[in-house]
Image (spheres, rainbow, N blue to C red):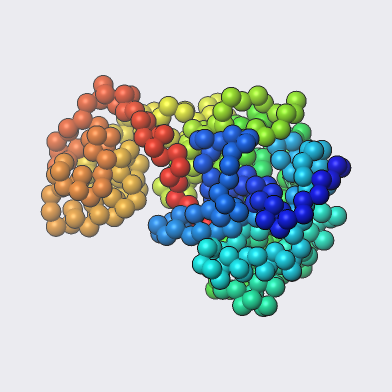
Amino acid sequence: MLVKRVPDIYDKLSLLTNGAKFDVSCSPSFDRKNFSKKESFSKFGIHNIWTSNGRCIPLLKVLLTNFCINDCAYCLNRKRNDIPRTIILPDELSRIVYEFYRKKQIEGVFLSSGIIGNSRKTMDMMITTAKFLRTRYQFKGYIHLKIVPDSDEASIEEAVKLADRVSINLELPTEESLSLIAPEKNLHSILKTVEKINSIIENKGKTIQTQTTQLIVGATSDTDFQVLKLTENLYKNNSKLKRVYYSAYMPVNDDPRLPQLSKPPLIREHRLYQADWLIRYYGFQVEEIVSEEKPLLDEKIDPKLDWALRNICLFPVEIQQAPPETLLRVPGIGLTSVKRILKIRKTSTLTLKGLKNLGVVIRRAMHFITIDGKYYGNKNQMKELSTSSIEKNLQQYSLDI
Ligand code: SF4
């Protein structure tokens, strides 16, 4: 591996934050609409991350090193790439993180790493960095630690002790895809690690700690059905898995194993987030959204509307009487609106205007409901319910870190 020297600490930091930006397991946190290989990056990798309760947290996303013994086709830091390589040792990295924190430039750190030497050595260095932060600097900020593949149980336990959140990336939903483009990784072993992390967090008893993971979308021929089936099982079997992040594949390397894309599949990524939401909070089964026969999400239409149009015989539903699980399936009615509808309808008769005030997207919902027996929709217009908000929403997922 060609190693170019990187002497200055801020040059090092710039390289190591640049190397960390493609990992979205703490959030999709850079402007991927304007993505380019030469993109200038937020100064020293400080990202504003939005939490699910609307709070903005500045977070330093950084690698301990961009050296790596692995050769994942999609990764900027893979061993075959001729890029400047560097490392910031735990002593120095913890000091820098603390300096940013002390000056109130960050509230936390997302620490990941290329694999240097082996998994044990890499985890040791990340853990030492976190330990220095917590003990030497009494750092009270947020720490998200990456667990590298093939980490042993002791390292995971130590990481969970120090971090607010940990993550290990699955990257791809099938063993075949992983062995094609990330040959050193093994899906079975990563899934076992996800389970191990889960049981370690569960055994801690009452704790707010959680884990996340990331799946890359569009780098292989895997379907949305395969992605969502894996996701559904992960949520079912791992109570401490807060969420799966989907990352539209960003071409950074020329590699014959990878597809030639003119732009990253951001709409597909967005649809997967919507489908994921339906599975986690709206009571949908994967097979209601996609199936082996229809394995891809429709990019032109959101998955809930797609489901409603395919099941039009179930509509319209009477807003004054439908049970909550039925209301949740109406396009244009979300979790909060359902709660409000249930409360208001106990004492009053709902109206079109009243529903709008409760947060219902009327132009969408009116085709699928009756209000006190009256239908305001137009079944012929249903298919024209456009997704004009896609572009606007692309960067607006609920981003809890
Ligand atoms: S293990 Fe793979 S994805 Fe991670 S840094 Fe190394 S080459 Fe990149």
Furthest residue toward top:
380
Image quadrant containing the N terminus: top right
* Residue 269: percent from left, percent from top: 52, 37
- Occupied quadrant, residue 395: top left
**Image point 35% across, 30% down: which residue?**
388
The x and y percentages for residue 48 are: 49, 54
Camera-nearest residue between 358 and 259: 259
Q: Is residue 303 left or right of residue 112?
A: left
Q: 399 or 288, which lies in front? A: 399
Q: Image quadrant of residue 121?
A: bottom right
Q: Residue at x 70, y 72 (%)?
A: 131
Q: 334 or 160: nearer the eye?
A: 160
Q: Nearer the viewer, residue 98 or 67?
A: 98
- Tell me, yes or no, if residue 270 can be seen here: yes
Q: How many marks?
A: 0
- Establish if 177 lies above or below 68: above
Q: Is residue 41 above or below residue 222?
A: below
Task: Classify residue 362 as left or right of residue 141.
Answer: left
The residue lying at 53 percent from left, 38 percent from top is 32
Q: Residue at x 20, y 44 (%)?
A: 356
**Residue 142 seen by the camera:** no
Where's residue 165, x and y in %?
59, 62
